[in-house]
Image (cartoon, rainbow, N blue to C red):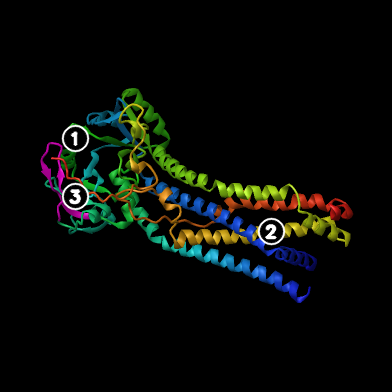
Amino acid sequence: MKRHLRIFDHAIATLLQSPIKTLVVVSVYSLLVATVVSLVLYVDAHHREAEALLASAPEIVVQRVRGGRHELLPLDRAAVIGEIRGVGRVVPRVWGYSYDPPTRATLTLWGAESVPPETLEIRQGQDLSMDAGGSCVVGQGVADARFLSIGERLPFRCADGELAAPSVVGIFSCESAILTNDLVVLPTVLARRILGVASDLCTDMAVEVLNPDEVDTVVRKLHERWPDVRTVTRRQIIQTYDAVFDWRGGVWILAISGCIAAFGILVWDKATGLSSEEARAIGVLKAIGWKTAEVMELKAAEGIVISAASLLTGLVAAEIHLVVFNGALFAPVIKGWSVLYPPFDVSPELGAYGVLVCIPLVVLPYVAATLLPSWRAAITDPDSAMRS
Amino acid sequence: MNLREGFLVRAVLGLLTLEIAAAVGLALIGSSRCERVKLARPANRRLVSELGLADLALWSDASYCRHSSLAVFFSAHSDHPSAMEHFPAGSMVPPPSFDNPVPEARP
């Protein structure tokens, strides 16, 4: 044990003999680890949040497409869809968009008769039932942008040119902003009036499938029955957000590819040969009686000390970036932007995943690159190693 | 092992231990800070389930960004033949803030 400690100590002393070089290597290495861990955890947190929330999205959304564009769906199809074996509830939905000139934001109007009370920050009394006379529940973003509070009216120009001004009876909580920030929930009758959706039509239908294994079969039957339908399954909804966040993370990978390339060159430079000073040092060690295994242990210790210090420094830097600065460096690209952007924080969790991503990516190549040329020098004759 | 040798090993091990403690401490702070987000998840999932929401309200300025999963694949390019995706919400960087007055709604 004492012998190993001495070798370890000699490795540290060797690294401190050239402090600038060691510092540069640790800095580059730490920067790479910090960037990779930070990006991986930040994107992973967005994936987890999207997956956790959308796990209860409709099993199948049925739309109608004509000429490559969405078209309203006849309501009578709901009964036919409901007769397909394995299908549970079929809910026709009325929703759409409305541009709000004062705020330059696009609001999402959603027809529903009630909303879960626990998602509301403020509400008028306990009765949340919204009558067709004109009431609505708005998201935090809408309330903030239009300075709305309970009882105030939010005017819309209906499809027929008339004005509708439902009064606000509830405001969604900040915690639900990721889902509701631009949302205005209205009674379906009023949503139809504003969006111009006739009473025998709907925007799309949410279809519940009793056995999740039968989703593909139900989808196939829907396409066989109506060639103009387009279906979106819950799996596809979650995959969409996986793809979006992966794509946005990929843009960052592209941006930091220069840093990765610099690290690759550093590793390649080390792997292709030792400097004459290093070769001479190995020759001296061999000449004074060090065995090849001991020289290799020394070089492995050097690599491990550099890797451990850089890995930990990189992890700490990544956490400071994510926890203290809320991932400020990556946020503009990963989160994107919008006129009404919801205030939300994802929860990056440092676990084995973040560390394990870095070990094969940066730690193993560096230690291998330290060992390979040292092994070549250690098995040669000390005299020729010192003269090389 | 002389005093200098022992000091170097101890110094490096101490530094690494400090870094481990800092990493663990920051991880704990991070997970506790986002506890509110996690507590709100059941209510949010109920909202998704009851209203049948299919998308996050992140990019609300174009229909294909607001409802990415429900949009037809080429809706970003559907304005005219060979149209390029032009809406700023589809990109990364917000447009510059112009000082021109807010346009009036068309009658």
Compared across the picture, whether A120 is left or right of A263 comes to left
Counting residues from the start of the chain, the first of labels 3 and 2 encountered is: 3
Q: Which mark is residue A304?
A: 2
Q: Which segment is the magenta one? A: A152-170
Q: Where residue B20 sits in the image (x, y, percent)? A: 58, 65
In the image, are marks 3 and 2 on the same chain?
A: yes
Q: Which residue is pictured at 17% across the width and 36% down the height?
A: A196
Q: Amino acid at mark 3?
A: Cys
Q: Nearer the viewer, residue A141 or A176?
A: A141
- The reply to whether dot 1 and dot 2 touch (C-beta < 8 Å) is no
What is the spatial separation of the Cα atoms under label 1 and label 3, in whole angstroms? 18 Å
Given this view, does label 1 or label 2 mark the residue nearer the observer? Answer: 2
Residue A283 in view: yes
Given this view, does label 3 or label 2 mark the residue nearer the observer? Answer: 2
Residue bearing mark 1: A197
Q: Where residue A112 sits in the image (x, y, percent)? A: 22, 44
- The reply to whether dot 3 and dot 2 touch (C-beta < 8 Å) is no
Residue B30 in the image: above or below residue A213: below
Q: Which mark is residue A136?
A: 3
Compared across the picture, whether A159 is left or right of A144 comes to left
Residue B78 in the image: above or below residue A350: above
Q: Amino acid at mark 2?
A: Ile
Q: Amino acid at mark 1?
A: Val
**In the orientation shown, which residue stands out farthest toward the bottom?**
B3
Secondary structure state at the residue bearing disc 3: strand
For disc 3, the chain is A
Q: Where residue A267 sits in the image (x, y, percent)? A: 67, 49
Classed neighbour count for the residue bearing mark 2: other residues with Cα under 10 Å, few (<14), some (14–19), many (≥20): some
